[in-house]
């Protein structure tokens, strides 16, 4: 198929952005979306032009690096997939495709389609862990049985890949889905419960400082999340936060 | 005697590690604060090492080229992690894990290292659970296990098909805790481009800030390389796009010997390639071989009918299917080790039984597992006389709970529903057992330079067993390196901070700047990918699943001329001072073009077959790999002498005191 691409380009962090138009021809429906961009970039290199910069690494939907806003949707038109798992069979000959970076104050553009998501790392450093040293002197892994339902729910929350699609898609640029996934995972497990109060307070405080917006429960994040992280996590985090705010200064 | 001293502690195998830990020097906590350690890589090995070293009190600087440590390629590991816990009470033990690993590696690994790995394996699971890693559990709340290839026990812990993700997020959270405390300084989007040696010791690195393009000099008392494997030398592999050999290769060129470079793992179950534009291959976890059965049609006419779309594989009768692994290896069946399974698939496809257009695919079929699980589930749910459809539906649910994400991945890529029709799979490059040579302390031949995880060569011999890389990465990072490095650093407590403006640093910085300038000014006519693809093809054709003397010589000649052409004709657009992915790729491919030659040279030299290294000249009557123990029971460690083709071979003899060398059999 032949396609017209309208791509956001920005030369560097402080440069002004613009939309550029490109044509690609003979795209196979079996190609992945990023392989289609590879084709474009080969064309650009052949002409001596700078290729379009975009983030990607694993190309199998797990590293969370790829992050394109395609035709107004984070990770594009397919559901339950990352950009790298999107395939060209979702498009048709003659389509015009708009490709933009994640847009959010907390994710400044580095270049073209690449953004800086280090705000997520800082939220994690504020409390996204269990304070246990890696000495290996812990108790036996089977010493505390964990109900399978809790373990499964914790696992589901833990599958978040930190891609930031939830933020990109939210009209308030809220990071609640991402943060609540980590808070939930650890709150559901006995190992994480000990620090739950401080964790949720510290992570939320950091989230606010990073400039993410408030959650108004529109639910757009859940729809676009490639890993199906559920809104239940946000509800759980709100409960955790409320409880923590009420009890925090007592301990 | 060889210059290589593996520093294996004396004494009985099972006491070596304990004794060694008691014997080596330690650094007192106050002094640790004054010591800087650079860790290149934040995968399981580097992430675990950074967190542990920081907890112990060292000042750590960690580097990764991705935008966050959480995205290292360990994240993509699917199937599981081994540990000798014997929770299933099926006779597992430290010794059995040790034995399976040495045998699985076709007797080309160091006994003492493997034993230590097996010994600390159980601790890894305890540690990860304490960190909140959500492993799969049974209804009773205890941890669940599955089986992997090459073993007869169930010792693999898992988190659906996302085990690597969960383990890496565990290590990343341990790192995050130390980053928050200021004990780890994290350098995201930084690429190490040179190792700096001062006074014969590794004292720092030169790194490029990938966002600004700045070339930075970082000094430390020791440098740990945990930069992953080099499978991308084949262009197409299951590795991430950015996985590369550069950090390891630069260290090699500065004096670190490169061990067993030709030992490559070709994984039997990957999604076959679909076209020339293909940028990478996707693994379908070995865990699927617990339930999936591998087959091709028995008759050529059925093969043709399937290829032409006249026959659906689900309509082919049982007696017309050749479950060739079950036929050839009745004892291990579909769970033979990877090298054996890959060669068997190649054998059937070369004989003309491949089931897709290119003739390079076999089936991985869940039909019988779905029905078996469905019947079980119906019983448990108390459904009497369930119809076939009900059984199938229940069975699909069970299979989804076990492998849901893998099935989804497969469907998204191929547009085929693997619950209804068998998966098509073919072998692909997956893992590199070879890597930087290290001694028992994980130190390379450069004092103060360590290598951990897939970047070193240490534990898997000529073939790695499934679920053992995650185990090794975490063992190295959490439990081995943090101790052994103290022995070396104890000598550095009075050294003080290492200056980063010595002539050695300036010289290394200049080398990096020169290469970047050369690449950008080259102004050739072909893209980096053009050369990478061609290199990949040479490697796959001649240094892939089957190798022979003629082909290897040809590969060496072709790689040499391709390398010349690259330096004459590559075109790298863009600038040095800013994000420039083409420039990053160019540097990596330049190193692959040297490494590829060394791999071919090593493969040529090793005229035996062992594990994943199959020399056609050396096989049994039944086509199995034939080792030559009296000639080749050694680790080949190559020293750089100025040209990949002129590398000098050193041998570390392997002695087996606790295991008898036998021809491997999985029949
Ligand atoms: C698809 C797939 C599935 C797998 N499944 C399993 C499994 O189920 N079980 C199992 O045991 N093993 C599995 N493996 C193997 C296992 O995942 C890897 O061997 C292991 O995770 C490697 O870990 P590592 O820490 O050594 O390196 P990696 O995780 O690859 O990390 C490398 C790190 O080095 C950094 N780096 C590299 N070069 C540079 C540089 N020049 N400068 C700065 N930073 C650099 C990267 O940024 C990254 O942080 C799988 C592998 C793949 C590809
Ligand atoms: S919650 Fe979903 S969308 Fe948000 S970062 Fe995690 S995986 Fe991405
Ligand atoms: S590139 Fe890793 S998730 Fe898309």
Image (cartoon, coloured by chain):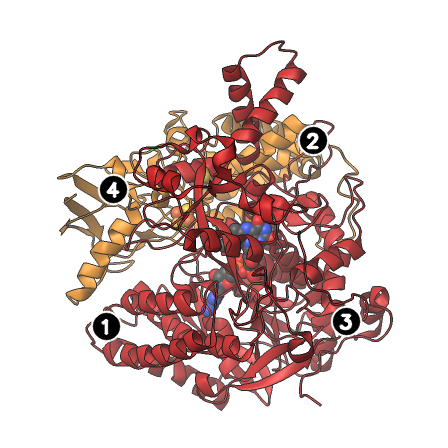
For marks 1 and 2, give the CA distance: 55 Å
Looking at the rendered structure, whether the residues under marks 1 and 4 are on a common chain is answered as: no
Mark 3, secondary structure of its residue? loop
The chain assigned the colour red in the figure is B
Is B225 positioned to the left or the right of B90 in the image?
A: left
For marks 1 and 4, give the CA distance: 29 Å
Few, some or many C-alpha atoms within 10 Å of disc 1 (few <14, some 14-19, many ≥20)? many
Residue B656: image tag: 3
Looking at the rendered structure, whether the residues under marks 3 and 4 are on a common chain is answered as: no
Is B504 positioned to the left or the right of A195 in the image?
A: left
Few, some or many C-alpha atoms within 10 Å of disc 3 (few <14, some 14-19, many ≥20)? some
Few, some or many C-alpha atoms within 10 Å of disc 4 (few <14, some 14-19, many ≥20)? some
Mark 1 or mark 3: whose residue is earlier in sequence = 1
> Could one spot residue B397 in this view of the protein?
yes
User: What residue sits right under mark 2 in the picture?
Assistant: B138
Say which colour chain A has: orange
């Amino acid at each position: 198929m032949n396609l017209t691409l309208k791509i956001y380009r920005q030369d560097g962090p402080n440069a002004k952005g613009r939309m550029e138009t490109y044509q690609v021809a003979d795209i196979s429906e079996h190609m992945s979306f990023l392989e289609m961009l590879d084709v474009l970039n080969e064309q650009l290199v052949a002409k001596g032009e700078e290729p379009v910069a975009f983030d990607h690494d694993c190309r199998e939907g797990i590293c969370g690096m790829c992050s394109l806003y395609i035709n107004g949707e984070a990770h594009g038109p397919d559901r339950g997939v990352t950009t790298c798992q999107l395939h060209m069979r979702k498009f048709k000959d003659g389509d015009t495709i708009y490709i933009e970076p994640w847009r959010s104050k907390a994710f400044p553009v580095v270049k073209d389609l690449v953004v800086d998501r280090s705000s997520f790392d800082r939220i994690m450093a504020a409390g996204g862990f269990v304070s246990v040293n890696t000495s290996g002197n812990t108790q036996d892994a089977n010493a505390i049985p964990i109900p399978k339902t809790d373990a499964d729910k914790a696992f589901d929350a833990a599958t978040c890949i930190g891609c930031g699609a939830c933020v990109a898609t939210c009209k308030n640029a809220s990071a609640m889905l991402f943060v609540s996934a980590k808070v939930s995972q650890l709150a559901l497990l006995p190992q994480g419960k000990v620090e739950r109060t401080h964790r949720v307070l510290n992570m939320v405080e950091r989230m606010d400082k990073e400039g993410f917006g408030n959650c108004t429960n529109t639910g757009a994040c859940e729809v676009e999340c490639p890993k199906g992280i559920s809104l239940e996590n946000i509800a759980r985090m709100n409960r955790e936060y409320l409880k923590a705010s009420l009890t925090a200064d007592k301990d | 005697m060889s210059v290589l001293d593996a520093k294996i502690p004396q004494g009985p195998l099972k006491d070596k590690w304990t004794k060694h830990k008691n014997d080596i020097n330690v650094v007192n906590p106050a002094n640790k604060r004054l010591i800087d350690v650079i860790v290149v890589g934040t995968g399981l090995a580097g992430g675990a090492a950074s967190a542990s070293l920081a907890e112990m009190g060292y000042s750590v600087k960690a580097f990764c080229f991705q935008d966050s440590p959480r995205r290292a390629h360990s994240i993509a590991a699917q199937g599981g992690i081994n540990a000798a816990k014997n929770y299933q009470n099926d006779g597992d033990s430290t010794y059995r894990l040790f034995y399976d690993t040495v045998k699985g590696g076709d007797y080309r690994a160091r006994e003492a290292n493997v034993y230590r790995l097996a010994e600390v394996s159980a601790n890894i699971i305890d540690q990860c659970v304490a960190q909140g890693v959500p492993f799969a559990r049974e209804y009773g709340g205890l941890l669940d296990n599955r089986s992997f290839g090459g073993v007869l026990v169930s010792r693999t812990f898992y988190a659906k098909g996302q085990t690597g993700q969960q383990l890496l997020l565990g290590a990343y959270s341990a790192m995050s805790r130390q980053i928050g405390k200021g004990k780890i300084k994290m350098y995201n989007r930084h690429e190490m481009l040179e190792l700096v040696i001062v006074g014969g010791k590794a004292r720092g690195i030169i790194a490029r800030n990938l966002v600004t393009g700045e070339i930075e000099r970082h000094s430390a008392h020791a440098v740990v390389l945990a930069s992953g494997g080099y499978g991308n030398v084949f262009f197409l592999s299951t590795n991430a796009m950015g996985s590369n050999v550069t950090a390891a290769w630069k260290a090699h060129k500065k004096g670190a010997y490169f061990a067993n470079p030709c030992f490559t793992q070709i994984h039997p179950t990957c999604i076959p390639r679909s076209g020339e534009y293909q940028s990478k291959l996707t693994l379908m976890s070995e865990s699927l071989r617990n339930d999936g059965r591998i087959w091709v049609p028995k008759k050529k006419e059925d093969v043709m009918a399937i290829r032409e779309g006249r026959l659906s594989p689900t309509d082919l009768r049982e007696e017309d299917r050749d479950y060739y692994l079950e036929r050839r290896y009745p004892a291990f069946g579909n769970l033979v080790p990877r090298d054996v399974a890959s060669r068997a698939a190649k054998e059937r496809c070369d004989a003309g039984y491949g089931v897709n257009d290119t003739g390079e695919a076999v089936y991985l079929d869940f039909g019988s597992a779905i029905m078996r699980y469905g019947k079980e589930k119906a019983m448990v749910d108390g459904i009497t006389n369930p119809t076939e459809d009900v059984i199938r539906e229940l069975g699909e649910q069970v299979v989804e709970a076990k492998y849901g994400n893998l099935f989804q991945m497969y469907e998204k890529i191929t547009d085929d529903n693997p619950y209804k029709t068998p998966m098509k799979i073919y072998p692909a490059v997956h893992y590199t057992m070879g890597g930087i040579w290290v001694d028992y302390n994980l130190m390379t031949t450069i004092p103060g330079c360590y290598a951990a995880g897939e970047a070193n060569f240490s534990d898997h011999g000529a073939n790695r067993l499934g679920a053992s890389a995650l185990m090794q990465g975490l063992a190295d990072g959490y439990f081995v390196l943090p101790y052994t490095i103290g022995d070396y650093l104890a000598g550095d407590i009075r050294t003080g901070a290492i200056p980063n403006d010595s002539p050695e640093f300036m010289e290394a910085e200049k080398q990096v700047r020169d290469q970047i300038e050369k690449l950008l000014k080259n102004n050739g006519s072909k893209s980096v990918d053009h050369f990478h693809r061609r290199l990949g093809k040479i490697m796959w054709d001649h240094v892939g699943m089957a190798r022979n003397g003629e082909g290897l010589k040809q590969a060496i000649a072709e790689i040499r001329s391709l390398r010349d052409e690259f330096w004459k004709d590559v075109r790298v657009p863009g600038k040095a001072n800013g994000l420039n992915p083409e420039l990053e790729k160019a540097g990596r491919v330049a190193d692959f073009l040297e490494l590829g030659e060394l791999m071919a040279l090593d493969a040529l030299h090793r005229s035996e077959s062992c594990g994943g290294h199959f020399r056609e000249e050396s096989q049994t009557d039944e086509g199995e790999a034939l080792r030559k123990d009296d000639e080749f029971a050694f680790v080949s460690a190559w020293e750089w002498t100025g040209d990949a083709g002129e590398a000098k071979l050193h041998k570390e003899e392997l002695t087996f005191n606790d295991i008898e060398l036998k021809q491997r059999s999985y029949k």
